[in-house]
Image (cartoon, rainbow, N blue to C red):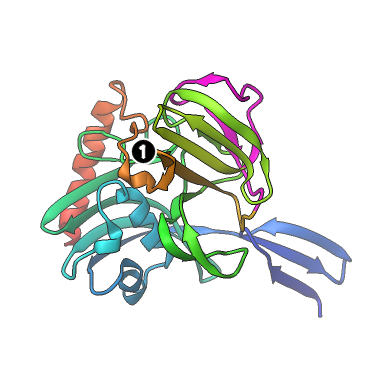
Amino acid sequence: PIALVYDLEDRKELHIDFEDAEVAIKDKVVDISIESLDAVINGSLAQTVLKHGAPEDLADKILSVFAWKIDFRHLQKGDHFNVIYEKETSMNEVLGTRNILAITFNHEDVEYAAYGFDNGSGHELFDAEGQNMSYAPLQFDMITSLYAQKRFHPTQRRYKAHYGMDFEANLGTPIEAIKDGVITRARYGRANGNNVKIEHSKDLSTQYLHLSKIDSSIHVGAKVKQGQVIGYVGNTGWSSGPHLCLRVWYKGKQRDPLDFDFPRRPDITEQNMPEFLQHVRRINSQMSQAL
């Protein structure tokens, strides 16, 4: 053999040159193409996406956009969506979905729409009026797990309840307090890794798990404001990859985070609104032509 290229995780390759005795780990060359998909739900969202030949993670990306608007555990046969997205490939291998650029989703005869735009903090999704679609305490790539009574645990390799909501994000992504409150826990736990708990009222608390580190300003008894950084995305404790697990406690019991009306992430600024509205008109024209 003259050379060897071996696939590694995180879109990297091991390159070995036997003639020159050189070894290097390199990033894969990734090509981005703009794709569209117009589909009717027949089964689960993931089944529908795969049936049409789109990357499997597109289903998670779609769920991530509308998680606070649509209950994806109760989709109806005949619901439909139209999405424009960026597909990543490398040497004809489909790697997955980078960003959703625009999407409309009709659920029970109600149409929801979202448009990708950089409001100054990276790619996010907004409705036609410029309201942020996300209520999460961080900028994330996609939601990988919802609150569930039964889920296959990725590290324990068994089915058990998952009383939280998982957000996949890059290692070190800042995590913000979802509301004003007081820190009641800021420590390491064997299962939860570095974790922080905030009491927002007598009845309501939120907990943030698997942090790479807790911010130096955070300690038990400290007051925090909504949007204040409390830590950073990590992979500590029982975790299979960098993510945040958000848990909500109400009257002493864990509840589905989607049941609570938390504040939205920042909407389109007044300064960016003219450009955003022009962008929406342009995207809507492209989507109507594609139908």
Q: Residue furthest bottom?
A: 1
Residue 129 in the image, given as x and y percentages of width and height: 20, 34
Image height of 288 relative to 193, above or below: below
> Is residue 243 in view from this perspective?
yes
Residue 207 place in picture, x, y as percent: 51, 39
Quadrant for the N terminus in the image: bottom right
Kindly identify the amino acid type of the residue bearing the numbered disc 1: Tyr
Q: Is residue 215 magenta?
A: yes
Q: Position of residue 244 (x, y in %)?
A: 53, 45
Q: Residue, x 30% and y 46% (percent of image)? A: 68
- Of all residues, the one furthest to the front in this rendering is 252
Q: Quadrant of residue 54?
A: bottom left
Tell me: 7 left or right of 168. Answer: right
In the drawing, does residue 208 fall left or right of residue 55? right
Up the image or down, 102 lies above or below 199; here it is below
Image: magenta residue range: 211-237
Q: Residue at x 21, y 52 (%)?
A: 286
In-image side of 37 versus 178 (left or right):
left
User: Around disc 1, counting alpha carbons within 10 Å, would you say few (fewer than 14), some (14 to 19), or many (20 or more)?
Assistant: some
Residue at 64% x, 55% y is 238
Residue at the limit of the structure toward the left, as seen here: 109
Number of labelled discs?
Answer: 1
Q: Please state if 76 lies on the left or on the right of 48 as rendered.
A: left
- Relative vertical location of residue 157 with respect to residue 169 in this rendering, above or below: below
Q: Kindly state the secondary structure of the residue where label 1 is placed.
A: loop
Residue named by callout 1? 135
Q: Could one spot residue 228 in this view of the protein?
A: no
Q: Is residue 182 above or below residue 265?
A: above
Q: Quadrant location of the C terminus?
A: bottom left
Q: Nearer the viewer, residue 17 or 104?
A: 104
